[in-house]
Image (tube, rainbow, N blue to C red):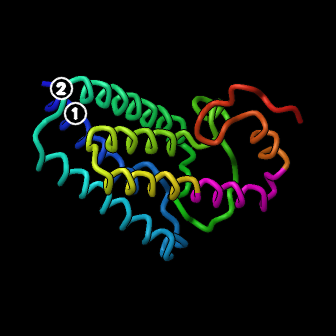
């Protein structure tokens, strides 16, 4: 049973991430660049290989699927919560070169600077957990580094904009992907 639940939830997560490009984020002309194209290819290869591994092997222990299902559901909840926060002021899609006009610091953004990426990273962690495949683990780790690079890319845009001062204060108070356990002093 847990196998089928995870299959459904992971499929939903794939569709949500795929469709978010068209529905959740604001696409700008500057996404026609090699970083964005690499990200698209990496996304498709990682998910494609995951589905290959998942459906070509015998199901594993139900506990693993149960834990992974809970993690993916939490990621979807975080994703949809973030989506509701940015509904009126859509964020640019990953690797856009546009200059930020605002930054959000409410909801999950009050806890971490990149909650969408947190959601994605935790989803990939669950894929690696379920797949138990070295190549899949490497692909998922590659996705983590891509999101880290994307977060740094976006933060540089903020630090090069007229939002620099407020964003620096925000960086001190919030973690990049995970909440700060200890608040830094300014």
Query: Which residue is identified by label 2?
Result: 2
The one of 101 and 54 positioned closer to us in this rendering: 54
Per the image, label 2 sits on a secondary structure element best described as: helix
Q: Which of 14 and 87 is in front in this view?
A: 14
Q: Position of residue 132 (x, y in %)?
A: 28, 43
Measured from the top left, where is residue 178 in percent x and y? 59, 34
> Residue pushed farthest front?
134
| Residue at image point 29% right, 47% down | 14
Residue 95 lies within the magenta run: no
Percent of width and height locating residue 158: 73, 55
**In the structure shown, which secondary structural element does the residue marked by tag 1 occupy?**
helix
The C terminus: image quadrant: top right
Give the left or right position of residue 152, taking residue 44 as reference. Answer: right
Residue at coordinates 39% horizontally, 50% vertically from top-left? 20
Answer above or below: position of 60 versus 159: above
Query: From mark 1 to mark 2, how far is it between C-alphas?
Result: 6 Å
Tag 1: Cα neighbours inside 10 Å, few (<14), some, or many (≥20)? many
Q: Which is the main secondary structure of the residues drawn in magenta?
A: helix
The stretch in magenta equals 149-164
Q: Please state if 37 lies on the left or on the right of 29 as rendered.
A: left
> Residue 69 is drawn in which quadrant?
top left
Disc 1 and disc 2 in contact, CB within 8 angstroms = yes
Q: Which residue is drawn at 87% across and 32% down?
A: 185
Q: Answer with the quarter of the image where residue 72 lies.
A: top left
Question: Number of labelled discs?
Answer: 2
**Does 154 lie within the magenta span?**
yes
> Is 105 left, or right, of 81 in this rendering?
right
Which label number is shown at residue 112? none
Q: In which quarter of the image is residue 182?
A: top right
Q: Is residue 108 above or below residue 170?
A: above
Q: Which circle marks residue 6 in the picture?
A: 1
User: Residue sitting at 16 percent across and 31 percent down?
Assistant: 3
């Amino acid at each position: 049973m847990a196998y089928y639940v995870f299959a459904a939830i992971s499929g939903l997560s794939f569709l949500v991430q795929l469709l978010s490009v068209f529905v959740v984020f604001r696409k700008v002309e500057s996404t026609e660049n090699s970083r964005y194209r690499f990200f698209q290819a990496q996304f498709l290869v990682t998910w494609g290989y995951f589905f290959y591994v998942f459906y070509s092997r015998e199901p594993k222990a139900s506990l693993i699927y149960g834990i992974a299902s809970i993690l993916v559901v939490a990621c979807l909840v975080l994703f949809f919560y973030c989506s509701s926060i940015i509904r009126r002021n859509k964020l640019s899609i990953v690797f856009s070169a546009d200059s930020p006009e605002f930054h959000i610091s409410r909801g999950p953004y009050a806890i971490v600077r990149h909650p969408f990426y947190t959601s994605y990273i935790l989803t990939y962690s669950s894929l690696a957990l379920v797949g138990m495949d070295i190549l899949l683990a490497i692909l998922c780790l590659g996705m983590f580094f891509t999101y880290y690079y994307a977060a740094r890319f976006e933060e540089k845009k903020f630090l090069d904009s007229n939002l620099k001062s407020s964003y620096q204060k925000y960086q001190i108070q919030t973690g990049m992907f995970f909440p700060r356990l200890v608040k830094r002093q300014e």
